[in-house]
Image: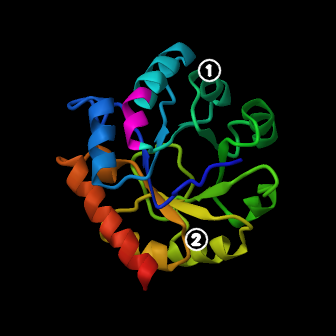
Amino acid sequence: MKLHFDLRLMLVTDAAMSAGRGLVATVLEAVAGGVTIVQLRDKTASDDELVATALALRAALAPTGVPLIINDRPHVAKIAGLAGVHIGQDDGDPKAARALLGPDALIGLSVTRAAEIATVDPGVVDYVGLGPVFATGSKPDAAPALGLPEATAIGAQLPLPWVAIGGIDIANAAAVMRAGAAGIAVVSAINAAEDPRAAAASLRAAIDHGMAE
């Protein structure tokens, strides 16, 4: 049976931004502040390097109960025993990932524009990563920003819960949640923060406030 996954606050890792503290330390501080799910993303690392990082993160997160998924490489998720995978539109096949990881894995799919709504199969995918909602500097190859009105309109047409990503911070997190998001995914708002725990706590407060309105 598939476990319940709390999508409210997803931390997408960035090894460069967290280099001063270390990736594991940054993630643990963020989880202590309220992160509910962690996505390991490193486009430049080799599979072997990602497996090693994934195993270290999974072991560190085990006492917290916070699940770890990986970006784009389901085979690494399989090897490292992770909770699932997030796949970009041009970075893999959700059906193949489901076949590899099994029915209990969490599988997310990116949607960057309205034309991609048709690619979302709720029989295969569990949630959608929608964005970039706002302009972002943490993903150089990101699609053009949707803006909150367009993201809201696309989100309303999706057959699955959606997690907003792209340029989200403490100033706009509550508004994104009011727009119907199940959660937000952030990179620099936590990884680049001087205090990742405090940054995560502030974001969680904004998220919960937005959900309550």
- The residue positioned 72% from the left and 33% from the top of the image is 101
> Residue 102 lies in magenta, yes or no?
no
Q: Secondary structure at mark 2?
A: helix
Pick the residue in front: 146 or 28. Answer: 28
Q: Nearer the viewer, residue 179 or 82?
A: 82
Q: Which mark is residue 55?
A: none
Q: Which residue is mark 2?
A: 151
Q: Is residue 160 above or below residue 69?
A: below
Tell me if 99 is positioned left or right of 90 in this view. right
Specify the color scheme. rainbow
Note whether residue 45 is visible.
Answer: no
Instruction: Return the x and y of residue 178 as percentages of the image width and height.
Output: 48, 79
- N-terminal of the pair, mark 1 or mark 2, is 1
Spot occupied by residue 114 in the image (x, y as percentages of width and height):
71, 66
How far, Cα to Cα, is label 1 from label 2? 35 Å
Q: Position of residue 125 (x, y in %)?
A: 73, 51
Q: Tag 1: Cα neighbours inside 10 Å, few (<14), some, or many (≥20)?
A: few
Is residue 51 something one can see in this rendering? yes
Type of the residue with mark 1: Ile
Residue tagged 1 = 79
Whether residue 61 appears in magenta in the rendering, the answer is: yes
The quarter of the picture where residue 15 lies is top left
Residue farthest left in this picture = 194
